[in-house]
């Protein structure tokens, strides 16, 4: 169990790709997407995960998170129980000074959406903003993956 502190941004160019040190394929679905708690199943490359996230604070930066690695076959089976709308994306990890940005390049009905997140030790922590980072969307719920699964970017 952890408290997750992160900020989320739109990405204005693909310049992050040449600086990425890792790229993973992610498929995820939601067993529960209530605003008070989200229960997610995810396959990252060949590894399954079950994640529970609590409601965000008023700034949208902080929330409870619990994650457990599960067998890929179990994760595949759980997709049959998920709510409508599966998210698929490539995640790029990009080191900028002492922080690692996770940049999601969405596929399917969210194709064209690029979103970066950076995890912080505290809400006021300073971090370097790379040139490809765009508008901050922290706390804007339409950019939450649980909402993108129901209201895809290409239908806005």
Image: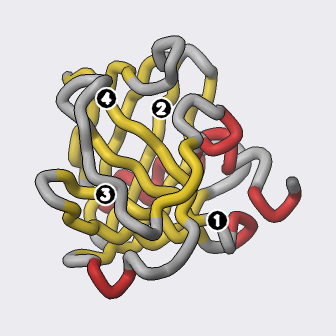
State the residue in front, 9 or 21. Answer: 9
Of the image marks 1 and 4, the number of the one nearer the N terminus: 4
Of the image marks 3 and 1, the number of the one nearer the N terminus: 3
| Distance CA(mark 1)–CA(mark 4) | 22 Å
Of the image marks 4 and 2, the number of the one nearer the N terminus: 4
State the residue in front, 125 or 70. Answer: 125
Q: CB atoms at circles 4 and 2 under 8 Å apart?
A: no
- Secondary structure at numbered mark 3: strand
Residue bearing mark 3? 101
Residue bearing mark 1? 113
x and y, in percent, of residue 106 in the image? 58, 68
| Vertical side of 53 occupied by 120: above or below | below
Residue bearing mark 4? 5
Of the image marks 2 and 1, the number of the one nearer the N terminus: 2
Of the image marks 4 and 3, the number of the one nearer the N terminus: 4
| Distance CA(mark 4)–CA(mark 2) | 18 Å
| Distance CA(mark 3)–CA(mark 1) | 16 Å
- Secondary structure at numbered mark 2: strand
- Secondary structure at numbered mark 1: loop
Query: Which label sits in the foreground, 2 or 1?
Result: 1
Q: Quadrant of the N terminus?
A: top left
State the residue in front, 56 or 107. Answer: 56
Which disc, if any, is residue 39? 2
Instruction: Count residues near mark 4 (Cα–Cα under 10 Å), then give few for <14, some for 14-19, many for 20+.
Output: some
């Amino acid at each position: 169990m952890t408290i997750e502190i992160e900020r989320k941004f739109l990405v204005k160019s693909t310049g992050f790709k040449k600086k990425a040190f890792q790229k993973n394929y992610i498929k995820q679905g939601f067993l529960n997407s209530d605003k008070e708690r989200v229960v997610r199943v995810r396959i990252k490359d060949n590894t399954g995960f079950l994640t529970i996230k609590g409601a965000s604070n008023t700034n949208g930066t902080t929330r409870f998170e619990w994650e457990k690695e599960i067998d890929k076959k179990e994760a595949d089976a759980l997709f049959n129980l998920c709510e409508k709308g599966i998210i698929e994306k490539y995640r790029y990890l990009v080191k900028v000074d002492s922080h690692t940005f996770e940049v999601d390049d969405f596929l399917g009905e969210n194709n064209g959406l690029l979103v970066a997140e950076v995890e912080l030790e505290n809400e006021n922590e300073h971090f370097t903003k790379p040139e490809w980072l765009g508008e901050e969307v922290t706390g804007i719920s339409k950019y939450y993956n649980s909402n993108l699964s129901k209201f895809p970017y290409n239908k806005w």
